[in-house]
Image (cartoon, rainbow, N blue to C red):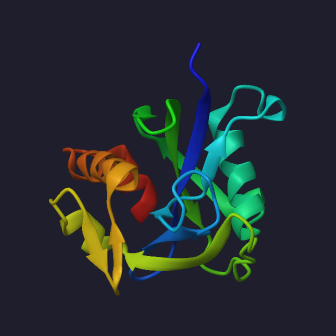
Amino acid sequence: MSKRGAVLVPIVAGSPHRVIFVERAAHLRRNPGQVGFPGGGAEPSDGGDPVRTALRELSEELGVAQECVNVVGQLSELEQRSSGLIITPVVGVLSADAPPFAVDGNEIVGSFAVPLPLIVANSGPSLDYDGRHIWGFTARILKSFVDEWNAPDSELRRAIES
């Protein structure tokens, strides 16, 4: 049985909506210094629920309480080839008045936001924004998100825009 995990694709409500990314610490064994989404491996306390995994990781990495997140959907599972983890991307909207992020400083050294319109307009295999390069597994998740967003009558798009 494959090991499972989840990430949260956090979207901050407001105009325009913004997607939050984290920068992983350089000392980490896996994906040091890379840009990604808050997330990680499932723990027994998550009860096999990817939403619980994603919200727990968001809380640990950025200090965001789950009460500040409206989960609006899940994307198709993806295998992270470097680790063999099967990852479920969970999409959540953070309230615009959520408290500031409290970056954990151990796994994550920073966070930044990219305007949602820029992401959904991107059709390439990677994205450059404000001197940062979003590629690899994170870009695969973004592609899945953009495909879902651009689908006719997208429930995900409707849930985020409401």
Q: Residue at x 31, y 80 (%)?
A: 129
Q: Residue at x 53, y 32 (%)?
A: 85
Q: Residue at x 42, y 39 (%)?
A: 75
* x and y percentages locating residue 118 in the rendered image: 26, 74
Q: Is residue 124 left or right of residue 69?
A: left
Name the residue furthest bottom: 130
Q: Is residue 46 above or below residue 100?
A: above
Most foreground residue, 21 or 120: 21
What is the number of callouts on the image? Answer: 0
* x and y percentages locating residue 144 in the rendered image: 31, 45
Q: Is residue 6 left or right of residue 15?
A: right
Name the residue furthest left: 123
* x and y percentages locating residue 55 in the rendered image: 69, 51
Q: Is residue 17 above or below residue 54?
A: below
Q: Is residue 59 above or below residue 49?
A: below
Q: Quadrant of the N terminus?
A: top right
Most foreground residue, 8 or 71: 8
Q: Quadrant of the C terminus?
A: bottom left
* x and y percentages locating residue 56 in the rendered image: 75, 50
Q: Is residue 156 left or right of residue 36?
A: left
Most foreground residue, 88 or 23: 23
Most foreground residue, 104 or 162: 104
Quadrant assignment, res 131? bottom left
